[in-house]
Structure formats: C-alpha cells, structure tokens
C-alpha cells in the first residue's frame, strides 16, 4: 500500500488523502494570510496569534503549519517544533500581560470542545477573575482497572 497518495489540489479543497478532501480551516487561511490575525510569532513550522474571543487579555493560539485536526495526528517534526517554542511563547505572554499564572488548553475532537479542526494550543493568562474556568469532576481510582489500563496504554505507544 505504501504512503497515502497526495495529489495537487485546488487551494479551496484543503488536504486530500486518497479521494477524501477536507475543506480549509480558518487557521490555514490565517497562516496563508488570507484572513487577518494579530500574529505574535512565526517560524518554518509554527504560527501564533491572538485569540479573537479571548478568555483574558493576551489569550494566544499556537498552531503547527501542518494541517492536522488533532494532536495525535501531528508529525514528530511539527510536534518537536511546537514543543520547542511553546515555553518561550508562554514566557512572552506572561511578560507582556503581567500575569503570573496561566493555563495551556488543547482540545481534541468536537466532544472535547474543539471548534476549529486544526491543532492548536491555547495560552490563557489568569488575570484577576479572567481566564480559563475549569470544572474538574474527578472520580475514585480503581487500582485493578488502572493497572490494566496502564499496561494497555504502554503497549500501544509507538
Ligand atoms: P477550540 O474550542 O479549542 O477549537 O478553540 C478555537 C478557538 O479559535 C476559539 O477560542 C476561537 O475564539 C478561536 N478563533 C476562531 N476563529 C478565530 C480567528 N479568526 N482569529 C483568532 N481566533 C479565532
């Protein structure tokens, strides 16, 4: 079978794998400069800009240039590039806003509140009462099930 066949496609059709074409997301259009953004950083693999509906001043989105919907689909190259720059961008956002606390939010899938299907990390400064509100409903830990799950996850890491 080999690698999925990629053919040149019109810009409006976004990514095509086999015969399935995904429409461009708004973030791809931002990277291309077709939609304006308040850019704060760009390199070969990464783009960062202010969120248009900020939870607090300085709310920033960090995205790979690679057009993938969820984090698990990213290439090692994109993942490494994001990992390298994310802490630097966190420091810059904190410095510019004067915040001393912040959240990183990264949603994957509509059921997990992802609205734009292009990988993105939110950097959300905590400023007074503004920032990310979290409802954290923890449950009791079952050690027998936990041991099984840990084994199963460990066996699936590639
Ligand atoms: P998520 O729910 O994790 O998919 O978040 C998507 C984020 O993208 C939201 O916080 C939106 O406010 C933000 N967003 C959507 N369109 C734009 C845009 N044109 N410029 C900047 N941020 C945007």
Image (spheres, helix red, strand yellow):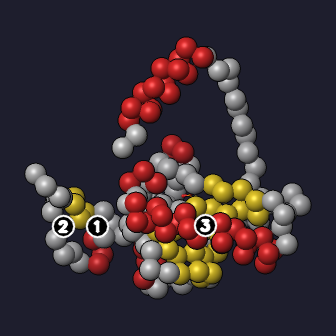
142 sits left or right of 136 in the view = left
31 sits left or right of 48 in the view = left
Tell me if I can see residue 25 in this picture: no
Marks 2/1: CA–CA distance: 8 Å
Question: Dot 3: within a 10 Å radius of its alpha carbon, few (fewer than 14), some, or many (20 or more) residues?
Answer: some
Marks 3/1: CA–CA distance: 26 Å
Please determine whether, in this image, residue 21 is positioned above or below residue 29.
Answer: above
11 sits left or right of 43 in the view = left
Report helix, strand or loop for mark 3.
helix
State if disc 1 and disc 2 touch (CB < 8 Å).
Answer: yes
Find residue 104 and report its horizontal and vertical position in percent.
Answer: 66, 57
Find disc 3 in the rendering and name its residue.
86
Quadrant occupied by the C terminus: top left
**Which numbered mark, 2 or 1, is in the foreground of this view?**
2
Is residue 112 or residue 157 the one in the foreground?
A: 157
Question: Dot 2: within a 10 Å radius of its alpha carbon, few (fewer than 14), some, or many (20 or more) residues?
Answer: few
Please determine whether, in this image, residue 105 is positioned above or below residue 156.
Answer: below
């Amino acid at each position: 079978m080999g690698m999925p066949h990629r053919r040149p496609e019109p810009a409006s059709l976004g990514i095509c794998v086999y015969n399935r074409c995904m429409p461009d997301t708004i973030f791809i259009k931002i990277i291309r400069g077709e939609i304006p953004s308040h850019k704060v950083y760009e390199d070969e693999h990464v783009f960062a800009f202010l969120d248009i509906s900020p939870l607090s001043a300085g709310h920033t989105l960090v995205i790979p240039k690679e057009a993938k919907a969820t984090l698990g689909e990213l290439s090692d190259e994109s993942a490494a590039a994001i990992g390298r720059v994310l802490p630097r961008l966190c420091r810059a956002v904190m410095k510019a806003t004067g915040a001393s606390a912040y959240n990183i939010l990264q949603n994957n899938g509509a059921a997990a509140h992802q609205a734009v299907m292009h990988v993105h990390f939110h950097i959300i400064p905590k400023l007074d009462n503004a920032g990310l509100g979290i409802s954290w409903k923890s449950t009791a830990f079952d050690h027998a099930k936990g041991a099984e799950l840990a084994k199963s996850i460990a066996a699936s890491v590639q």
